[in-house]
Image (cartoon, rainbow, N blue to C red):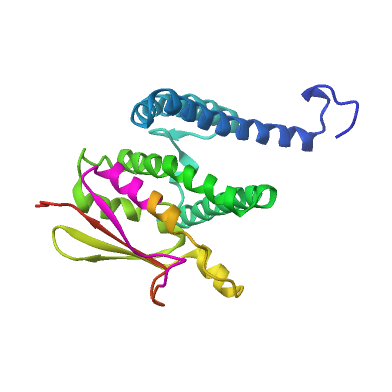
Amino acid sequence: MAEEVTRPEDMSKEDLARFVLDIFHRIAVHHTLWLREVEHQMGMPKALAVLGTAYKESYAVQMKRLAKLFNFDLVDGIPKPLLERSREELLEAADEVSKNWLANDGLWFQAVEFAHGMNDAKRCNDSCWTRYSPFEAWSIRNLLQLPERPGLEGLKTALHFRTYARVNVQTIIDEGPQSFVFQMNDCRVQSARKRKGLDDYPCTSVGLVEYTYFAEAIDPRIKTECLGCPPGPHPEEWYCAWRFSLENAS
C-alpha cells in the first residue's frame, strides 16, 4: 500500500474493497469473541441463550443495512437473490460453504502446527470442539425448532444437518429403540491423507469431544461410545464409528 495513505479516503478502489472485506472479517471475529467471553464469565448454556438474542437482532440490523447498500430485497429476513436460486443451487451452496468451513478448520490447525508443533495443534483443536460442538448443536436445534429433549430420533436428524454431513459420507444404523450406530464412511480429511500415502490422522481424542458434546447438547440423556477411530484399527467401509444410546427410551 502506498506510503501516502493515511486514511481510507486515500486508498485506491482495489484497496478500499479489501478494507470493506476486512471489516466483515472483524465483525465475524468480534462476534465470536463476545460469545467466548460470555461463555467464560457465565458458562456455555447462558452464553448460548444470550447468543440467541444477540444474533437475531444483529442479523436483522446488518442485513437490512446491506440490503439497502447493495440494492436487494429481503423476504422474511432472507436475501431475495438467494431465494431465487433453485433447490439444487442452494444445496450446492450448502456444500461449497461447508467445504469452506472445513478448509478454515484445517488451515487453523496447520497454522498452529507449523508455528508450535503437532501437540499444541491437537490440544487447541480438541479444546475448540468443546465449544463448537455445543454451538453447532444449538444452531441446528434452533434451525429445526427441535423440542427440549428430542431423544435419539432428534439426534439422527441433527447429524444430517452438521457441516460435516455436507462434505463427508455417513451412515446411520438402527439397533432398536435404545441405540443406533453412526459411521463415517468417507472422511474428506482422511481420504485426502490416504491419497497422499499418509497414515490416518489420529482423531480419537477430538472425536470423543466432538460427538459426546454434540449428542449431549441435543439431549443430555444420550450417551456416546466410540466403536473405532484412528489411530485405532477400522474396517475399509468406515473411518470411525460411534454408538449413541438412551436408556429407557420409548
Q: Residue 194 location in percent, x, y?
A: 55, 73
Compare residues 212 and 99 and report the one nearer the observer. Answer: 212
Percent from the top left, x then y, of residue 209? 40, 49
- Residue 19 or residue 81, whichever sits in front: 19
Question: Which residue shows up at 64% across the image and 30% down it?
Answer: 23
Above or below — where is 228 with respect to 44?
A: below
Percent x, y of residue 135: 40, 39
Q: Is residue 233 above or below residue 32?
A: below
Identify the residue at image location x=27%, y=63%: 181
Location of the N terminus by quadrant is top right
**In the image, is 179 to the left or to the right of 209?**
left
Picture quadrant where residue 236 is located: bottom left
Q: Residue pushed farthest bottom?
A: 236
- Which of the pair 216/174 is nearer the observer? 216
**Relative height, residue 77 to residue 141 (above, below):** above
Q: Is residue 73 visible?
A: yes
Asked whether 31 falls inside the magenta stretch, the response is no
| Residue located 38% across and 75% down the image | 237
* 136 with respect to 110 (left or right): left
Residue 69 at x, y percent in the picture: 59, 28
Residue 163 in the figure: left or right of residue 31: left
Q: Considering depth in this image, is 122 or 63 the residue closer to the camera?
A: 122
Q: Which residues are magenta?
A: 210-233
